[in-house]
Structures are given as structure tokens and as C-alpha cells.
Image (cartoon, rainbow, N blue to C red):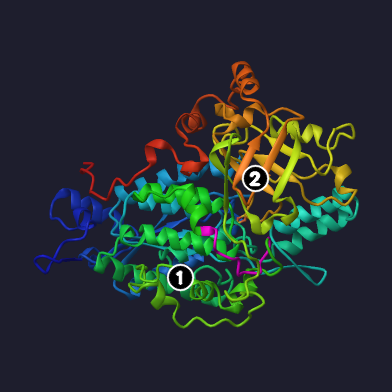
Amino acid sequence: MTDNKNNKKTPLRSQAWFGGDDKDSFIHRSWMKNQGHPNDMFDGRPVIGICNTWSELTPCNGHFRELAEMVKRGVLEAGGFPVEFPAMSLGETNLRPTAMLFRNLASMDVEESIRANPIDGVVLLVGCDKTTPALLMGAASVDLPTIVLSGGPMLNGNYRGKPIGSGTDVWKFSENVRAGTMSLSDFKQAESCMSRSTGHCMTMGTASTMACMVEALGVALPGNAAIPAVDARRKLQAQLTGRRIVAMVQEDLKLSSILTAAAFENAIMVNGAVGGSTNAVVHLLAIAGRIGIDLTLADWDRLGREIPCLLNLMPSGKYLMEDFYYAGGLPVVMRELLARLHGAALTVTGASVAENVAVADNFNPDVIHPLAAPFKDNGGIAVLRGNLSPRGAILKPSAADPALMQHRGRAVVFSSIEHYRARIDDPALDIDADSIMVLQNCGPQGYPGMAEVGNMGLPKKLLQQGVRDMVRISDARMSGTAYGTVVLHVAPEAAMGGPLALVQDGDMIELDVAGRRLHLDVADDELARRRALWRAPEPAMRGGYQSLYIKHVQQADQGADLDFLVGCRGSKVPRESH
Ligand code: FES
């Protein structure tokens, strides 16, 4: 690293551990040498931390040991000293009550692990949904040179000769079983046909979206988002990532130089163009909060409004991530959008966004539509406000039914996900296709952790009549692989007494997506009467991490981070331990 003023080399922070002649440096070097490292590894070369979220309980990241080895190869080739360390892994499909509850906990693990160790630069190995924001949030609070490597999507699912997509087809198949149009044995057979290789969900779910987001933010090498997990080029990407982080340390290219307001604006526009997950909203808000960028829900609405969806991928379209890669991947999308993006934004390559995507070719315009003939006109995220969501709620128009974008209906209210499950298939439930399903107490504090239950399945009796979409409203999230006219992230949430808590069966609700309005048609004095009677629900657990989380979690419109974790605390070397 060079001190620009004096053109003199300043020692790397790792030298505070390894560079001395005293007993402390003896200890730091000697114990590391028990792993077989030669003296020259401690001679002032960049020490690169490889933060690995490998876990057998996170199947999407199951290949990360091999990927880490390829990163190490690149680091060694470039003259660095690679050191791999684990971070709490977040497996979306296994963690209960929801992986989102642990995103902030994992970010804390990552932040403290980086700062407390002799590390000069970091490679973040991310894949399954929450691992990407968790690691980037933690790293942003330290602000060392940092590069992200995504693990890549699984191969396309294939069931009886037809492509099937992670998550998206689970929701479809499940509805078909409930509607009586798919047998249970066929449903079970589809399990093995969906997840055919290591890697994350291969629809444009949250993992693929976040892989696109890190590429759009400029914190991953171009091409990062779409290379399949098992393609040899994913290994190459890992090796090149290892090489590049060493140079980034030498250039002192910190995360804060890349994660600028322009980078976040680019990512929001790209999210619209790829039909990305609604979860990107809370994750980008939280990452921005860590690095000190003032990003708001209004930015999402403003920047996404004019962005058409270019990508014909599930859940908005029909193709899958493998097809996206073969069509040219995210650089093609960014090149199409370039006139609207901040092309001069700096990226981890040391070059600008515009330079990175200058030569991207589109090999399949049915997968990646050109801007002149988009796949869908409305790609962005709609932010809805009104007396039901004073601090905002969101909806993904590209995954919703256009016929329901302007809708007035009678509320059918579920006070918890258990209440929903107990009632939904009751033949006596007073519900029809025009009703609006309302789910309460599934927000950050209420669940806790803001579970992905917002895309509640429709009542069996309506499915059997052929109904396939209805307006649903909640303070929950939904899987990025899901679809439907689903209003999510209502803030403030029901469990903290937001207006959502006051909705009752039979109330009329108006949804006006074009007008960005969500209105509960109940008189103010009646709402005041209900508020006086409202009591906060009992927490699911007392003590432990959950109680810390409930006490400090922010609402969805602020990214659902813990209030005391917001901000960057830097990379100052802590005092010695001996
Ligand atoms: Fe891991 Fe979808 S479950 S990415």
C-alpha cells in the first residue's frame, strides 16, 4: 500500500501482528506456522481473508471448500497470503423461524472476525440468499479492500423433459396438488428433478438477485452473477477474484470507494431490469446503512419507475439462470441500460461500469430482451403508501397480475401464519376471488425476523375454481422465487402497533399501484377505538438472541438492521491481547 503524500509504502495492518521482533509477533507468527507457512508469508505481503459460508446445512453453498481453494490459488499467484475463515452460514431452506432472523447476527460475526484478525483485504464467498447481504454488511462496517464472489446458480431443473425452477415451481406444484391437478407421488418425484447440482436457486430468486446486485454495485468481477456453480468458469472466476483482491490491497481500493450512492442507484435500476427479488430492497437499504449512504424506499420507487424488465427469467418469465449465462449474463443487461446507469462508477476491477460492460454481446434476445423491446414494461419495485402503510410497503409489478393492480376488496384477516393455516382451507371461510388476504404479525419483530410467508397460498376452494392470484397484504417478505399480487414489508409492522394490526374481517381495502396508494377504508375514529383495545402479541421466545433482535431491529423501510449495527466502525487495529 502506498502513502500518496510521501510516495512511501505504509505497512499493511497485518504487519501489526506479524511485522515485529517482540514476543507478541513471535506468538502471532509461531502459531500460524503450525499450519506449515514459511517465513516469507509474514514478510509484509497482503494477507487476504477468505470468508467462507460453507456448511452442509446450507446446500446452496456446498461447493465452497473447492471454490475457496481456487481463490487461494489466485491470491498466491498474485503474491498474497490467503487465510480462510468461517462465518455463520445461513441456509434458507433449513433455518427456522427464518434465515432473515440471523442475517444481522452473521453480519456481526463477519465484521468482528475481519477487524480482530491480521487481515488486509477480504474475499466474501456468498451464495444462498442471506449470505450475500450478511457478509457485505459486515465487511462494509469495516471498510477494507473487499471483493465478493458468488457461488453461482444450480443447473436448470428438469422434470419430465421440461425446465423447472427452484422455488417458483414448488409454489406452482403445491397449488396444483391442493387444486387436485397433480398427484402427491408426482409432486415427490419432482423434488429430485429440481435441485440437480450444487449452487443456489436458479430462478431470479433472492440469491440470483443478490448475485446480480453485487455485480451491479461493482463489488464483484463482471460475469459474477450467472456462471453456473458447476461450470469450470466459476472456478476461474474464483481464481481471478483471488488475484484481483491482492492488487486491490496494493491500490488501497476500499469498499467505500465502490459502494457510493451512484453504485446503489445502479443496483436499483439493474434490479428492475432483471425482475429481481423484493428482498433486495431490505438488503440494499441495510448495506447502504452500514457504509453511510442515505438510501430510502423513495429511491427505489423513483429509480425503478422507468425501468422495464429485460430478463425473461422465472418467476417473472420462463427461462432460468443457466440460460441467462449462455445469453451473455449481467454485463449484457448493464450494457443495455448504460445510458441510464452511472457509467463512470468505479468497480473492483479498477475500471468503471461502462468500461467493464463495453464488449458484452447478447447471444439470446429472447432471454435478455433489448431495451427497445423489453420483456415487460414495469420492472421496478412499487412503493405504496397510505393509512395502511404510513412508512411504506412494496409490490413487484412484474410478478403480479395486471388485472389486480387497481383493486378494492374485502379483507380476510389472519393474525398469524398459524391462524392462516388453520383457516385457509375451511370450507366455511367467507372468501372469494375479490377478497384481499391480510396477514399480521409476520414482520421483523413479530415473527421474529420477517419470514417469507407473504405469498400465502390461495384457499383450496378458490384454486379448484381456477383462481390463481389474489391481492395479499402483510408485513412479511416473500421468497424471490415467488410471484403474485403480493404487498409486502408493510411498515410499521403489526406487532409494533402499525395500522396493519387494526384491520378486521370485512374492512374494505384499496390498492392502487399506479397511484402508489394502499388505503384502509375505515374511519379514523373507528381506527382510534381499535387502537385503544390493541395489545402487543407475546414474543415467541424470551431471552437469548431473539430478544436482542426484537429490541433493536429496525423496520423494513430502513432495511431491518439492528439499530446498533448501522454505520461503519472502520478497520483500526485493536489493542494487543497478550
Ligand atoms: Fe439457497 Fe434459494 S435456498 S438460494
Residue 487 got which mark? 2
Q: Is residue 385 left or right of residue 406?
A: left
374 or 198, nearer to the observer = 374
Q: In which quarter of the image is the N terminus?
A: bottom left
Q: Position of residue 486 (x, y in %)?
A: 68, 47
Local packing at callout 2 (Cα closer than 10 Å; few below 14, some 14-19, many 20+) is many
248 w.r.t. 493: above or below: below
196 or 150, nearer to the observer = 150
452 or 387, nearer to the observer = 387
Q: Where is residue 350 in the image (x, y as percent from the top left)?
A: 32, 72
Chain part drawn in magenta: 304-315
Which residue is pictured at 28% across the width and 64% down the height? Answer: 253
Furthest residue to the left?
6
Q: Does the magenta stretch include residue 456?
A: no
Q: Is residue 104 left or right of residue 326?
A: left
At mark 2, the secondary structure is strand
- Give the image quarter of residue 393: top right
Amino acid type, label 2: Val
Picture mark count: 2
311 or 453, nearer to the observer = 311
The residue singled out by tag 1 in the image is 238
